[in-house]
Image (cartoon, rainbow, N blue to C red):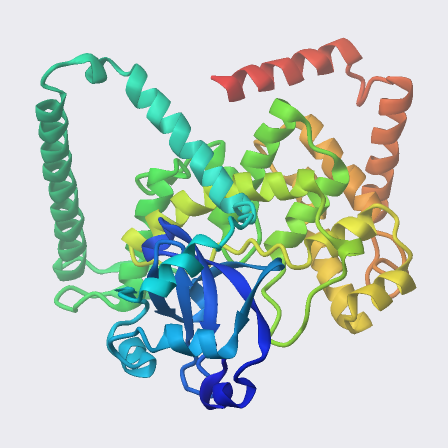
Amino acid sequence: PGGGDDTNANDGKNQQADDVTVKGWGGTMLVPALLLDDGGRTLPPYLVCLGRDNKYYILPDTEVLAVDFDQPIDMLDSEAIDLLKGLRRPPWIAFSDDPPMYVESSTLPESASWALQIPDIDVPPAPPEVVAQQSRVQKLEAQIESSPIAQLENKKKVLKAFKFLRKVRQEKEKESREMAAEMSSYSSVTGTINGSSIVGGEKPSFLWSQFLNLTEVLNRYGFLEGTVVTPDLGRLGAEVKGDNELWVALVLLELDNLFWDQGLNPHHLAAVVGALVSYEPPPGSGEFPETLAISEEAADILDHLRVEVQAPLGMQQAAYKIGVGANLENYYVGLVEAWALGEDWMSLVESSGMQEGDLCNLLRRTLDVLRLIPRLPTLSRAFKRQARSAIKMVGRYPITDTVTYELQAEEIEEIEQEQEQDKDNIPRDGEGSQQQDEDDDDHLDERQA
C-alpha cells in the first residue's frame, strides 16, 4: 500500500502488501519485511519496509533479495499511513543521510502485531560463483584443521611469525625488482629489444615497466626462467594466439587436466572456447531464450575456471599493474554449444536475435582457437583428439565454406584419421595402440605429479 504523494487517495481501501526479504549489511543478514511505501517519484527511489524484527528499513531496491506475491497481507491504506507516521525522521531525509540503508526501531504498539504476521520467504539459491567459492573455502578450512599447526597451543604466534616473515620476503623481492629495473634503466650499457634502445641515463618508459612486470608474471607461472623460455610451458605460451596468451594457455592446460580427471565432451570444449573469444554484449541486447541456455556441465567448467584460473591470474596481474583482460563471458556459451550439437543455422539465427554476420564471426573465432589446439605443444594427444572432434562439430556450413573460410585439407584428414582410430582402434603413424596408451598413461602420471 502507499505510493509517494498519492497514498491518501486510496484511504480506506483494502490493499495486499507484498512481502520482501531485505538483504542486510554486506549480505550477511536476511530480514523478512512488509513493503509499506515505494517512495513515489523520488530520485533516487527508495522503499520503506517494516521488518519482522519490528524495525523500519529505508533502502534501495538493490538491497531486496526476493519478493513474495503468493502470501499477501491485507492492510488498509490508512493503516499503512499510520505505520509510516511512526518514523522519527522523514523517509527521504533518512535515506539521503544514511546510505545505503537506514534502520530505525519502531515505537508504535500496533507495528508489533503487523510484524508478527510477516511469513517466512523462500530465499533463491546462491549463484554458481558463490557456491564454488564456498566450496573452496570449506576445503581450505578442512586443510587448516588438519594442519599440524592447528594442533599447536601457540598457533597464533606461529601464524603471526609466518606472516611477518612473508611480509619481509615480499618487501625484499620488491626491492630487488626495483633495483633491477633501476640498474637496467640507468646503466651506461645500451640494450636493444625488438629494435628499441634504452640508453643509460634515461628514465624507464611505461612500456619498459610493463615489459618487466610481464616478465615477472611469466616467471611466476613457469613460462620463463629468468629471460629463457621454458621447454614445456614456455613453448606452449609462445604458440598460443590471443589478446592474453598467458590466460589462454592456462585455460587450455586446465581443460586438459579436467579432460583426464572427469572427461570433457567436444561440445563442452567448444562452449568454453566460445566463452574465451566472446565479449559482453552492449546494454539493451536482451537475454537469449531458455532453449539456448548453457548446459550444467559447461557451467560447472566455467565456474571451475573462474575460481581456479581466472581469479589467481587476476590477482597476479593486479599486483603487477598489468591491464590485460582475462575474458570468460558466458552470455553466448549456450549459443556456441547449441551449434556444436547440430542446431540448424536459420533456427539459431532466429533464436539468438543476432545478425548473421555477427553470429558467423563469433563461431569462426571459436573455430580459430579450436584449430590451434592440435598444433600446440605440451597438451596431451587425447585432449587434441577432442579438439579435432569439436572442430568438425563447429566447422559446418556456413561457418566454413570454399570461399571465405575453409578448413585445410590436412586438418580434415587428421580429423577423419582420428575418427577411424577411435572406431577401429587402428594404430596411428606406425605406432601400436598399446604404445599410444602407454604414452597417454605417462602423460597422465606427469600431470598428477
Can you give x and y, in whole percent of width and height, for residue 97 in the image? 24, 77
139 lies above or below 79: above
Residue 102 picture location, percent across and down: 29, 68
Compared across the picture, whether 271 is left or right of 315 comes to right
Q: Please, is residue 336 above or below residue 151 in the view? A: below
Task: Give the side of residue 326 with respect to residue 267, left or right.
Answer: left
Viewer-side residue, 119 vs 184: 119
Please tell me whether residue 311 is drawn above or below residue 162 in the rendered image: below
Which residue lies at the image location 60% right of the left edge and 30% below the top edge? Answer: 258
From the viewer's side, name the closer residue of 338 and 445: 338
Residue 300 horizontal/vertical position (percent): 61, 39
The quarter holding residue 199 reads: bottom left
What is the total number of numbered labels drawn onto the structure image? 0
Q: Is residue 55 visible?
A: yes
In the displayed structure, would residue 308 be above or below residue 19? above
Which residue is found at the position 76% from the left and 42% from the top?
A: 267
Query: What residue is at 59 percent from the left and 19 percent from the top?
Result: 443
Q: Is residue 195 visible?
A: no
Residue 361 location (% of width, % of height): 73, 65
Please name whichever residue, 377 or 199, is drawn nearer the observer in this view of the structure: 377
| Camera-side residue of 27 and 346 | 27
Which quadrant would residue 141 be assigned to in this image?
top left
